[in-house]
Amino acid sequence: MRKTTIKTAIAAITVASIGLTGCAAKVAPTGSGDVRVVEVALEAENAPYTYEDENGNPAGYEYEVLKLIDEKLPEYEFHYQVVDYETAAAGVNTGKYAFESGCKFRTPAREEAFLVSEPYNYFFMNLVVKEDSGIEGLTDLDGKSIASIVGTDGRAVALNDWIKNHPEVAIDFQELAASGAMADEIQGVEDGTFDAAYLSAEQANAIFEEAGYTDLKITDRVDGRDTVFLINKSETELQAAINGALEELTADESLGKLTVDFFGEDNFKVAEEIGLKK
């Protein structure tokens, strides 16, 4: 099974430094009118997708995607704030932020609460289990437990969908009322509280590098979803602009190449191969 080394992947990307306060206006093309500054919420502590680097600047795959989008939209200037999970969602709802980025799956509840973008990446889920557990996939968890995830997390939606579609597999999965740390989910497996944790290999490897687990392993992929930006309901023009840029960046394979840099393979091609990309 492929193991992504997050520090190596991130080191391969040149990240422009952007302060969290203030922003310089982008020079608009002649005749294009004023440039609009757009406040964007990036979720903290979600490496390698969105996080703060050692200097307190926004970083990660999704930040690099947003920079590519911003380059294609001279009428907008993206200004970033790195915030926690709840603050990001609440801020977009109230209009404090125009949209948020944080590895969010498309779900019915989110499509009702927000405008959503076209996919900018595909997220593949794996399991973290004990080395000697014999667990390789979700079907092996019949009569076993998966670490709790907050119900509003797209992972919980995806997992519940899988459980609903596989009634013959009795997985013990309980949702959290408030968000918790992914590191706690993996620690729950280490402690024997749960039989597995359900997250991406990239997220798990980032936690492994910090914690130094020796008796846990990451399985091959067990599921997958597309990821989207969540946009304030009133921002229809911005949604259209972002979607236009994403279509161009997907068509010219810029996003696919960026996923190779970060994840070691073209996630768009993988998604097409396994039926996620329509």
Image (cartoon, helix red, strand yellow):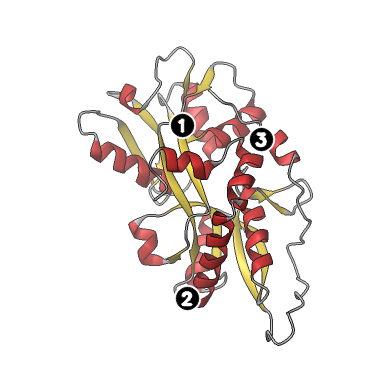
List the residue tagged with mark 2. 236
Q: Which of 42 and 4 is in front in this view?
A: 4
Q: Residue at x 65, y 77 (%)?
A: 75
Callout 1 amino acid: Asn
Q: In this view, does 167 lie above or below 83?
A: above
Upstream in sequence: badge 1 or badge 3: 3
Callout 2 amino acid: Thr
Using the numbered discs, state the Cα–Cα distance from disc 1 to disc 3 in whole angstroms. 16 Å
List the residue tagged with mark 3. 6
Q: Where is residue 192 in the image (x, y as percent from the top left)?
A: 44, 21
Which residue extends farthest top?
Answer: 132
Q: Which secondary structure, mark 2?
A: helix
Callout 3 amino acid: Ile
Q: Which residue is drawn at 56% across and 37% down?
A: 203
Which residue extends farthest front?
Answer: 252
Upstream in sequence: badge 2 or badge 3: 3
In this rendering, position of residue 197 left or right of residue 17: left
Q: Residue at x 40, y 52 (%)?
A: 152
Residue 173 can be seen, yes or no: yes
Q: Where is residue 276 in the image (x, y as percent from the top left)?
A: 40, 45
In this rendering, position of residue 168 left or right of residue 253: left
List the residue tagged with mark 1. 126
